Image (cartoon, rainbow, N blue to C red):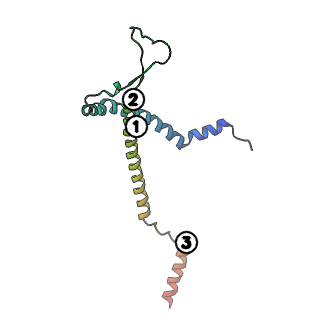
Amino acid sequence: MKKPSWWDEFTAFAVKGNAMALAVGTIIGAAFSGITKSLTDDIIMPIVAIFMGNVDFSELKIVLPRLFGEAVLDEAGNPILNTLNYGNFISAVINFFILALVVFFLVRGLNRLTEAGKKKEEAAPPAPPAPSAEEVLLTEIRDLLKEQK
């Protein structure tokens, strides 16, 4: 028997439902990530900034010192600063928690639906099997013998 080529193995893997579902989930997840980023940056962070004195999180940073060489200037002649942008990191962490919370509720809902479907299957007892032709014939013979007595 001929050993399947790597291409045959790959196509068998790619066509399986799990690989296709993973690809679709990745694409939808990337699109959903954009939505949660917008929710974080455009809706949640401005509300949080109200309670923190109108702080713009994207402006939160620490300027790091230059240890070697001269300062590099931009086109306008201003020094380009080396900054540690922790405000963007805070926004990314909040974005992650929102995304994780939404995924948690989706998985939780799907698990409950799956459990409900299993309970329905378990609750309905299986129908008794129909008697075979032999059993029907034997039952008829038994009934006839009973009537003759």
71 vs 41, left or right, is right
Which SS class for mark 3?
Answer: helix
Residue 53 placement (x, y as % from top left): 25, 30
Mark 2 in CB contact with mark 1 (< 8 angstroms): no
In the image, which is nearer the foreground, mark 3 or mark 1?
Answer: 1
Q: Is residue 2 above or below residue 147?
A: above
Label 2 vs label 1, nearer the camera: 2
The residue where tag 2 is placed is 86
Q: Which quarter of the picture shows residue 141?
A: bottom right
Tag 1: amino acid: Phe
Give the left or right position of residue 52, taking residue 136 as reference: left
Q: Is residue 125 above or below residue 85?
A: below
User: What residue does disc 1 label?
Assistant: 96
In what quadrant of the picture does the N terminus appear? top right
Q: Residue at x 49, y 83 (%)?
A: 143
Q: Give the residue drawn at x 42%, y 52%.
A: 111
